[in-house]
Amino acid sequence: MHFQEIVEIVRPTDSGVTQPYQCRLADDNLYAVKGRGATARGLMAEIACATLGRAIGLPIPDFCIGVMDEKLLEASGDSYVSSSLGAGECFASLWIEPTDVFSLSMKRHVDIKELAKLFVFDHWINNGDRTLTPMGGNVRTGWWLHIAPYQPCYPICLKLGWKTRQLH
């Protein structure tokens, strides 16, 4: 796991209870960044699930620990950015276009084996976020099944005995 400085806060993302922002990191790429709004426990889950998902072959976008400088937060002049991201370490996942909510009409364009693998993984980590009905849902897989970051993987971290440093 590597660390990168967050050099620009671009905009809030369109959705997400963890209050993610699109940010540019030192490598000049855009990332979906989650910080204080995701809680320390949630950030550990993001890291663990991205790592586990990659290990079983899911197409997880590149990720790292983004480091938010206090001066960049102050320069934004927006208290919401400060409360959503906070200074210090954040989880950053490479921004993949289009990272859209998956709809039922898109399912015929995705490999059924990849969907099955995703279903098993979501069940394994107890991910209750990924739901889909004819009315919509919160299925952030991206158009070609790049998997968006996860939250509920934290219990697996504890079972594996993973120790992490305090993120916030």
Image (cartoon, rainbow, N blue to C red):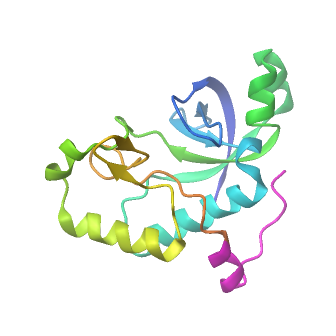
Q: Residue at x 67, y 85 (%)?
A: 159
Q: Name the residue at the left extreme.
A: 108
Extent of the magenta region: 155-168
Q: Position of residue 168 (x, y in %)?
A: 84, 50
Residue nearest the observer in this picture, 132 or 86:
132
Q: Is residue 164 magenta?
A: yes
Total labels: the figure holds 0
* Residue 150 quadrant: bottom right
Q: Is residue 116 left or right of residue 120?
A: left
Taking the image as drawn, is residue 146 in sight?
Answer: no
Q: Position of residue 103 (x, y in %)?
A: 28, 42
Vertical placement of 35 versus 119: above or below? above
Q: Residue at x 35, y 51 (%)?
A: 132
Q: Quadrant of the N terminus?
A: bottom right
Q: Position of residue 48 (x, y in %)?
A: 61, 68
Residue nearest the observer in this picture, 76 or 110:
110
Q: Is residue 82 magenta?
A: no
Q: Residue at x 51, y 28 (%)?
A: 14
Q: Position of residue 148 (x, y in %)?
A: 46, 51
* Residue 27 quadrant: top right
Taking the image as drawn, is residue 82 in sight?
Answer: yes
Q: Is residue 110 left or right of residue 40?
A: left
* Residue 32 quadrant: top right
